[in-house]
Image: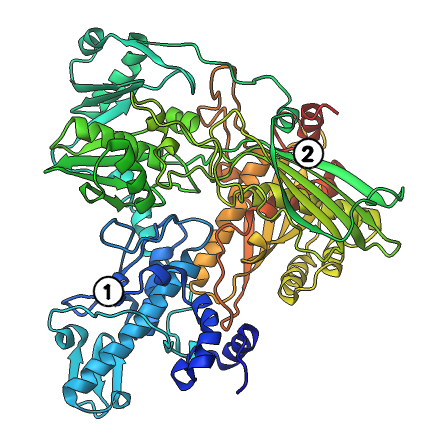
């Protein structure tokens, strides 16, 4: 019997355009030998929660409710999942309702992170919906005592071929839900028969946003709701010495309760304005210890490189010992990105209610189940006593203050039971207390042969963690560090984010990549794309420098080092998009490419900039992108995410840097931490390569790294200045960067 391998099976799927798994035809020996092949292809969430009714419910009105453990973060997961379910169940899109992350209600899918919502949650829904479709047909066939293949299914109804009788899904189930597990073999519809997948379907919530209708957790209001604020320490490590509650109540008579627990001070008032006034007044009525100073005024790039590190070898092949032995053909450079913040437009917010021995929380956390695990330890409550419902937040680009504000609201609700307690962070709190994207330093050197090909590559990156999400650890919740029974912060978080995309996606025979992990002075965690932003900025800037040294066209130089045809096609299409673009004096176009995580979406970026020769101020004129995210689920969604990623990364690259003094963060408003204004936003053009027979790939974080490199490469062509230290415009372009690095 012919042996079935992963590659041959995938080749078959590409050719057939459908998935039909026929294990029942195989003998036991064959099945056992290839079981791992099948398991590899079961979508992520289904592995732990294979029940059909964990993913969808048939409603009494004939519609279908789809359940996802993922949150809506602007990636459009609600619309994309509805498209997938509607196609497999032959429904109109309006007949599908999507219910977002909620403990005890939706599947436990961990965090909404890593651009994995489509690959994991949407594909799990696809399999569950396909299984549900077959079960519904089987039930109808049994009801009419006729073969299932004589039935038709459309718009929530199953009809006999002659059209004389039909049943709605709800009638067929008689008030029950579909039971059983999603088991292989699962027959998916041929992709050529899809009605919704691959189309550009606008997100309905955008219209609600434009109309200023309630969308976000910040918009939630409940009858009798009270409001809260937190009195923050003057620095990370400051401890509370005393609070003069009498003077505080005298200053703000509307205070309902002051909650003091160790160094945590929370104030609850009937009206939000009173809570805000109490927060301001409390600064005069509290005394704090003097903490150890932060390393302000120092060369940050040098400082982080001199911190104690743990080193990991990421990749090593061939021999790089001779990388710099041949003079004239080697090149060396270093690159720096500063601490950067999420800068969420809507500061973090949560509502909590403790009633009848149960704690309810409404939050824009990216992981309601991991948050519950952390809270049960912090609050010493049983799991079943905590219910968390996900509600979209205004501006979520990673681990911002969402989990922290939820934990604080929970503490206050326990101290003031029976009332919805709404806690809204201020702009200053969001800027000063959120966990930032880590500062990173990268050093890279390479050698070219006589033909201009890279023969040796040595890369080292220094970085703090890029993820300290709660993940069941209360020490990663900000408030837990200040409680009387405190939980210390973890000494380090997820290290893989630091070396994400640190290995170049190019064919280089002799290569070595090392990652050095330090514990820096600021609170850090996941910011969109994690370390890929810094690593791709460094690698793709250096690729441009190498291309120039080799005397090659930058796009041709990249293509010459690629073996992946999809990567080459993306770069070639980018070249076609920009071929006729003209540049004036002091203008330039730069290019960059990466494949996110080296296994996800392919993204090639071009940027056109104009540089004022007198001031060095950079204007981004236009940016282009070609992205290949495999099978397109929602064309509009991929474009939206790519456009947003390009604009956000352009803002990071040109303007954004977290500053701090000896005591704490000094970037506490939009003046001290500028982001792109509407006048700064360039034209953007995104071309999507749709590959319906390939797996869908996460696209939300593909553009950030190549955008940074494309911009600095464009600046070099416009001005002759090579920017290796970000942000570009933090007080004087490259001159500041060189000074910062002590060169």
Closer to the N terminus: mark 2 or mark 1? 1
294 sits to left or right of 361: right
At x 68%, y 31%, the residue is 616
- Along the line of sight, which residue is nearer the eye, 514 or 644? 514
On the rendered structure, is 147 left or right of 203?
A: left
Q: Which residue is mark 2?
A: 612
In depth, the one of 489 and 635 nearer the eye is: 489
Q: Nearer the viewer, mark 2 or mark 1?
A: 1
Q: In the image as oriented, which residue stretches furthest toward the front? A: 29
- Against 637, residue 293 (above or below) is above
How far from the left and from the top, in percent, is residue 658? 52, 27
Q: Mark 2, residues whose alpha carbon is within 10 Å: few (<14), some, or many (≥20)?
A: some
Seen in the picture, residue 61 relative to 674 is either above or below; the reply is below
Apparent side of residue 314 relative to residue 155 in the rendered image (left or right) = right
Quadrant of the rendering where the C terminus is positioned: top right
Picture coordinates of residue 404 (x, y %)?
34, 32
Residue 53: which numbered mark, if any?
A: 1
Q: Is residue 72 above or below residue 201?
A: above
| Residue occupying the point 43% across, 25% down | 432
Image x and y of residue 715, in percent = 69, 40
* Element under disc 1: helix
Q: Is residue 357 visible?
A: yes
């Amino acid at each position: 019997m012919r042996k079935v391998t992963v590659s041959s099976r995938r080749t078959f799927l590409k050719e057939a355009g459908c998935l039909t798994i026929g294990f029942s035809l195989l003998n036991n020996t064959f099945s056992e030998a290839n079981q791992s092949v099948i398991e590899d292809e079961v979508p992520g969430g289904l592995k732990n929660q294979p029940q059909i009714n964990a993913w969808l419910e048939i409603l009494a009105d004939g519609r279908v409710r789809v359940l996802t453990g993922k949150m809506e973060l602007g990636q459009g997961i609600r619309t994309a999942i509805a498209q997938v379910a509607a196609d497999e169940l032959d429904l109109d899109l309006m007949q599908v309702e999507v219910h977002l992350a909620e403990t005890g209600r939706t599947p436990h899918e961990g965090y909404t992170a890593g651009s994995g919502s489509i690959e994991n949650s949407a594909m799990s829904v696809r399999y569950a919906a396909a299984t549900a479709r077959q079960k519904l047909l089987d039930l109808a066939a049994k009801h009419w005592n006729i073969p299932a293949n004589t039935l038709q299914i459309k718009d929530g109804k199953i009809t006999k071929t002659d059209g004389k009788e039909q049943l709605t899904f709800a009638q067929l189930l008689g008030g029950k839900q579909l039971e059983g597990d999603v088991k292989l073999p699962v027959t998916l519809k041929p992709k050529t028969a899809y009605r919704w997948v691959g189309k550009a379907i606008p997100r309905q919530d955008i219209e609600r946003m434009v109309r200023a209708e309630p969308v976000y957790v910040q918009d939630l209001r409940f009858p009798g709701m009270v409001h809260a604020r937190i009195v923050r320490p003057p620095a990370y490590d400051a401890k509370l010495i005393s609070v003069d509650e009498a003077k505080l109540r005298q200053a703000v008579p509307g205070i309902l309760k002051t909650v003091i627990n160790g160094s945590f001070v929370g104030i609850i008032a009937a009206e939000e304005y009173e809570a805000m006034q109490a927060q301001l007044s409390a600064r005069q009525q509290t005394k704090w210890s003097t903490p150890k100073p932060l390393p302000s005024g120092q060369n940050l790039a040098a400082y982080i490189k001199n911190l104690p590190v743990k080193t990991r070898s990421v990749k090593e092949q061939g021999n790089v010992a001779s990388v710099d032995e041949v003079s004239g053909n080697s090149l060396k450079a270093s690159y720096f990105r500063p601490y950067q913040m999420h800068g969420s437009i809507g500061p973090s917010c949560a509502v909590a209610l403790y009633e009848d021995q149960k704690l309810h929380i409404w939050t824009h956390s990216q992981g309601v189940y991991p948050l519950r695990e952390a809270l049960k330890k912090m609050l010493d409550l049983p799991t079943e006593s905590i219910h968390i419902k996900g509600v979209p937040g205004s501006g979520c680009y990673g681990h911002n203050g969402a989990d922290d504000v939820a934990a604080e609201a929970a503490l206050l609700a326990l101290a003031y039971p029976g009332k919805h307690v709404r806690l809204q962070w201020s702009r200053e709190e969001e800027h000063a207390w959120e966990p930032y994207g880590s500062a990173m330093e990268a050093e890279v050197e390479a050698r070219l042969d006589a033909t201009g090909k890279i023969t040796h590559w040595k890369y080292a990156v220094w970085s703090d963690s890029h993820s300290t999400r709660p993940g069941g650890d209360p020490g990663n919740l900000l408030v837990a560090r200040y409680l009387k029974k405190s939980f210390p912060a973890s000494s380090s978080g997820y290290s893989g984010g630091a070396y994400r995309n640190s290995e170049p996606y190019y064919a280089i025979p002799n290569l070595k990549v090392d990652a050095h992990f330090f514990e820096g002075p600021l609170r850090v965690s996941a910011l969109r794309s994690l370390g890929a932003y810094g690593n791709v900025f460094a690698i793709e800037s250096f690729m441009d420098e190498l291309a120039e040294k080799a005397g090659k066209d930058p796009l041709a130089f990249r293509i010459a080092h690629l073996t992946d045809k999809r990567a080459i096609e993306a770069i070639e299409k980018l070249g076609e998009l920009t071929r006729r673009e003209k540049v004036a004096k002091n203008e330039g176009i730069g290019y960059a490419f990466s494949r996110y995580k080296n296994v996800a979406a392919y993204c090639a970026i071009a940027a056109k900039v104009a540089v004022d020769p007198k001031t060095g101020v950079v204007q981004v004129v236009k940016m282009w992108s070609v992205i290949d995210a495999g099978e397109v689920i929602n064309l509009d969604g991929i474009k939206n995410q790519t456009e947003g990623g390009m604009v956000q990364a352009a803002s990071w690259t040109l303007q954004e840097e977290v500053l701090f003094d000896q005591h704490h963060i000094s970037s506490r408003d939009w003046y001290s931490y500028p982001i792109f204004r509407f006048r700064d936003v360039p034209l953007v053009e995104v071309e999507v390569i749709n590959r319906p027979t390939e797996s869908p790939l996460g696209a939300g974080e593909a553009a950030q790294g190549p955008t940074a490199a494309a911009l600095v490469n464009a600046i070099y062509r416009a001005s002759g200045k090579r920017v290796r230290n970000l942000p570009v415009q933090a007080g004087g372009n490259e001159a500041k960067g060189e000074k910062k690095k002590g060169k």
